[in-house]
Amino acid sequence: MGYDDIYDMGKNDTIFELYQLTPPYLFIPETMPRVYKRKTERGGKPLDVLQRAETAFRVSGKLRETARDFDIDPNTLRRYIIKVKENPGRVVETGYTRLSQERCILNPDMESDLATHIKDLADQFHGLSIEKCRELAFEYSKRNAVQIPANWEKDKKAGKDWFMAFRKRHNLANRAAEATSLARATAFNRHTVGKFYDNLAAVMDKHMFQPQDIYNLDETGCTTVQNPGKVVASKGKKQVGSVTSAERGELVTLEYAISAAGNIVPPMFVFPRVNFRDHFLNGAPPGAIGSAARSGWMNEELYLEYLRHFINHTRCSKDRPVLLILDNVESHISLEAIDLGRENGVVMLTLPPHTSHRLQPLDCSVYGPFKTAYNVAMDSWIRSNPGKTVTIYDIPSIVAEAQINAMTHRNILSGFRSTGIYPFNRTLFTDNDFASASVTDRPEPMAAAEELVDVTPPTIHPEDHFEQPLTQEPNNAIESMASTSSSGLQDTESLVASPEHMDLGDRYVSPAAIIPFPKAPARKTKGGRKKGSTKILTSTPIRNEIAESKKEKRKQETVEKSTKKQLFEQKRRNFEMDDDESSSTSYEEMELCDTDEDLESDDELMEGDFVVVKLQGSKGQPMHYIARVDVIDDNELEGVFLKKVSSHPNRVGKPAFVIDLDDEASFPREDCVKKLPTPTSLTGSLRKSNQLVFPCDLSKWELKC
């Protein structure tokens, strides 16, 4: 049996005819298993084995003998020989992989483009949910005239099974995103990080620091309420609890410093107390110090105290300087601390703002394991002391245990290595690490005017898909997302065809045209606080700049304080003058207006009048209130009651009242004991002007307001 005989025999077989279908080979089953497990090993022969068998058959011309020698089914070898003869010079694909590709709704190039766009959005911290990805796939297929199943048209999004297979083919996963502030996402950019490495390289080249001379300093907080870890419980139980010390805890601040050689400077505890006592540190790590602050947070005075502690332990001097890398918080940039560091050989380098999550060794690899070990140690403490609650005085002993378990030599060295500080590696971060900052990247004005957007479509073969006109508008959810994006969408869509007039041979709608990459508009310049940056604090120019800014700030605070004092004095004088004028009507004149006549008829009562209302208490005792009449309806009155101001006596010597708009009610006319004269308003501040004083004696009613 020769090569041509094999080919002629294969053309007459029904199996061969299955592969002679008119393109495209589009198989869309109505249902499919979510996780398919193969029942046989058919179609699993490696391609190189088939190639060697085909070469051997060319020499021998014996099909079954060749198939037996290579352990291949004769029909499999015969079909492969036929495909090789029909496709000379091309690598022939075999097995079920080829069939699965033929069943795909999007061809490999389009799928790759879609998957790349989804990954790029996730790298920029603007990732899409599963539902949005399915909507994007539907819109992407519609705009490129790809035939889609009926359930896609019905739901206006891709099917669940298709997306699961698509996710598996392109190594995608549904991840729980970590909340990242916009400041952190955009501040970590190549320019800012490059400036930090420039400063780091400058001080390392100047002082030739060794790993034992490079330190990182940062604060963290330990609370008396731990975050319970996982526990073993009954499967399927709705809720599993774990005992904590309290609902809300107190916070103790810790200040740590670690070196690139793996050493730890004993920490400082800041307790939320007014005064510090030595017994606060019972069980603390050896060499630790403590202090107290009303807020429990680090401030400039406490940082200065810890800096002295740091200098004492590192034994640094001008002849043996050390590098201290710290974040850009206000308490670290005090002039006293900078001068103390300069006097003792401490070179201070600050990190760029909002980049400590990637550039600070303590945050990258130390504090995470430390908090986990701290929660475990507190769980053990609670189980060892049943019925007791954790106080701030128990925290030092728990911290000592967590420090031993978490602040290991390996973790500390990993922190300096993962930030590129030591060993020095400024090329550590790639473009993917800076992708989140591309939202605010802005090209030069001239370059932006000359820039052309290149939208290169993936290869689309007309025979791979049915061509059909689009009769439906794009999906509203996708369209709304595109409309809320920046002007980058308009620039891109001007280069692609519209759904109504699209020719697949000429134009291609990319996923970026449907959901473009987010782009922030031009920043509006405004005054206010100066933006921070990485600095060598102990350098003379920076030190003088900080001293000048501190001096200017104190001067401005003095001016503001003086201005406020002048305004206060002016208001006080105006108040005294107005109060003297309002008190010109003497108390005796007000007594003349005081009448004890009872309310006799409806004609004497008008809307807006003030009356004393008599109400019966819960024990039958009469109680008197003052009310303003707002509505008169025969014998039924409606109004709001007044509330007495509980403050020091005013100059008039009579009680003051304010209208309580929330205390509104109706009462019968016969409960009105007395109609009061028109009250006068106090003068002075806005609060005083709302207070009313009645020119009559109200003491005999024992008002309950």
Image: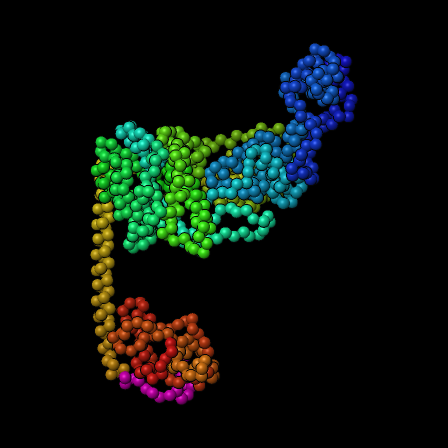
Residue 30 percent location from the top left of the image: 70, 39
At 65% across and 19% down in the image, what residue appears? 49
Is 600 in the magenta? yes
Residue 6 percent across, percent down from the top left: 75, 17
Q: Please say whether residue 287 is visible from this viewpoint.
A: yes
Residue 440 in which image quadrant = top left
Q: Quadrant of the N terminus?
A: top right
* Main secondary-structure element of the magenta-colored stretch: loop
Quarter placement of the C terminus: bottom left
Magenta-colored span: 591-609
On screen, 31 above or below 462? Answer: below
In the picture provided, is 646 more to the left or to the right than 585? right
Q: Quadrant of residue 80?
A: top right
**Residue 298 counted in the magenta span:** no
Q: Residue at x 31, y 77 (%)?
A: 655
Indicate how the structure is coloured in the image.
Answer: rainbow
Decide which of 110, 620 is in the foreground and name it: 620
Question: Which residue is rendered at x = 41% and y = 71% of the image?
Answer: 661
Q: Residue furthest top?
A: 59
**Residue at figure coordinates x 67%, y 38% from the top left:** 33
Residue 599 in the image, given as x and y percentages of width and height: 39, 87
Q: Is residue 332 left or right of residue 518?
A: left
Pick whichever, 29 or 348, lies toward us.
348
Figure label count:
0
Left or right for 498, reference 653:
right
Residue 13: x %, y % from top left: 77, 23
Give residue 15's quadrant in the image: top right
- Relative to 663, residue 412 above or below: above
Any part of residue 198 in sight: no
